Amino acid sequence: MAGSRYHQILALDPQHLEAIRLLGVLAFQRGEYQAASDWFGQALSINLDYAEAHNNLGLLLYTVGRMDEAHQSYRRALSLKPDFPDALSNISQLVYEQGDSEKAIQYCRRALALNPDFPEALNNLGVALAGQNKLEAAISNYRRAIELNPNFADAYNNLGSALQAQGEDSAAVHNFQRAIDCNPNFTDAYINFGTVLQEQRQPDLAINCYQKALSINPNQAKVFNNLGIIYQERGGLQQAINCYHQSLVIDEGYVEGHYNLGLAQLLAGNYEDGWANFEWRLKTKKYKLDLPGQVWDGSRLNGRTLLVYSEQGLGDTIQFVRFFWGFSQFNGRVILQCQDKLQSLLQPLTELSSIVAVVGQEKPTPAFDVCAALMSLPYLLNIHHRDAIPNPVPYLGLSQTAEIPLCHTPAFKIGIVWAGNPSHENDRYRSTTLQQFKQLFDISGCQFYSLQVGEAANQIEPLLDHYPITNLGQSLNDFTETASVVAQLDLIISVDTSVAHLAGAMGKPVWTLLPANPDWRWLQVPRDTLWYPTMRLFRQSKLGDWNLVFDQLHAELNSIADGKANLKKFD
């Protein structure tokens, strides 16, 4: 045993620096951090200029999270021995985690100039390059590190993450498995493996990975958060909420845990807690407030100007502008900054006494005193119960002059939308295809109008000559034009996207098709929604299975066409 030999050396020479240091290294490898610290401290008490001991102590301090002290130890090692590849590689990892990827790259390149076949430095260089989104270069370094050390678990894990970021899920899975083979207790590899399996819609296998990670280390907020997402997608809402809560027990400041808990609470109808946790989205990179100035706290404006900006999707904006009703009580001026496609549609909001302007996002932001995200209004206005949600439907007016007049027909006129924005995080579940709608086209007395825009609109071309469907998508350049068409239709059937919100806000009959893992706003009430009184919800019973939904649609639409049922209309 190496430890025995080092003790034998110390019995002969109690101040043998290398034996003392290596006993510290062995203790560190066993996870005996206090013993390791004592050995490194003993070596440095004999020779304060022992660069290797400073480097080892730095790695120990880094491992236990004492970053500033670790940095000092690495710097001391390098001041004593500037051409020290191990210390250069180690400090590169630290400065990268402190947010300086460029400095990390410089340290790694210095280490590799001294030792080109240094697997750890190649791996750390890959991490820093990946942090700059230079994935090909990162992958090259990971692969070289693995060539030099075929049992390098960290490099396999990092290579898997880089490949996953490039969409190469199968290759990522292979490398995560290799990382686990090399280190069966590698929690990060289990977590990453679970994440890619979750993306591949293999929830059972993902759960197995997460549970293995928790068996090794139960104090991992991210794992409980990921488990919560899976359970919520499966319809286990309370189980998901429990997982999100557990993530916050482990890390009370865990942003994703708060945000996902908020979404789950809102889906459950718990608005008081849900809106508060939903605010944590503003701490994420995606939704972080990027406007200068003071954030509004919901107090009276007293003559100040409040800028409310749209931070999410088009449908979110349409849904949430309802909260401007009643704003006059705040005694101030309000400017809405919305997506350019919605500006003309929402311009009539200036008729409200408190709204002075509706502006687009492409032009310079007008002067303001305080600002707020549009979807923060329920929280700022203390909307704790569903009965307190403003519902002034129709709050977007019907077009007085049809910009796109439809040909006169006695047929029942139905607008359809089958796909939303493909960049939406749940689009793979919420969108469907035009093929699913085909079974509706055989219902007599109905004329269908496609309101679909974007790439998905290309699905309509093969059907135009065979079914009673008119393609209007190419004519819809902004939402004023879309509203003009919606005003002339008898019914809109849409997946969960902006057109459904538009029809609901206009008080038009709309049937909204929901996946089994619906967005928080639709709650778990089977058919109705508190947001739009003329909307009916058609829900999947199994995630990804639209067949039963369209069977229901067919039966309902047949009844209306036969005059056996009536649409829910706004009076």
Image: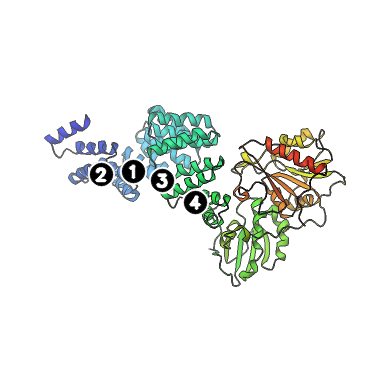
Q: Amino acid at mark 4?
A: His
Of mark 4 and mark 1, the one earlier in the sequence is 1
Marks 4 and 1, how far apart at CA? 27 Å
Name, please, the residue furthest toward the left: 12
Give the class, few, some or many, for how many residues have Cα within 10 Å of label 3's Cα (few <14, many ≥20).
Answer: some
Q: In this rendering, is residue 197 above or below 330? A: above
Q: Which residue is mark 3?
A: 97
Marks 2 and 3, how far apart at CA? 24 Å
Give the class, few, some or many, for how many residues have Cα within 10 Å of label 1's Cα (few <14, many ≥20).
Answer: few
Give the class, few, some or many, for how many residues have Cα within 10 Å of label 4's Cα (few <14, many ≥20).
Answer: many
Mark 4 falls on what kind of element? helix
What x and y, as percent, mark residue 528? 67, 50
Q: Nearer the viewer, residue 69 or 430?
A: 430
Q: Amino acid at mark 2?
A: Gln
Q: Amino acid at mark 1?
A: Thr
Q: Amino acid at mark 3?
A: Glu
What x and y, as percent, mark residue 93? 38, 42
Marks 1 and 3, how far apart at CA? 12 Å
Q: Which residue is mark 2?
A: 34
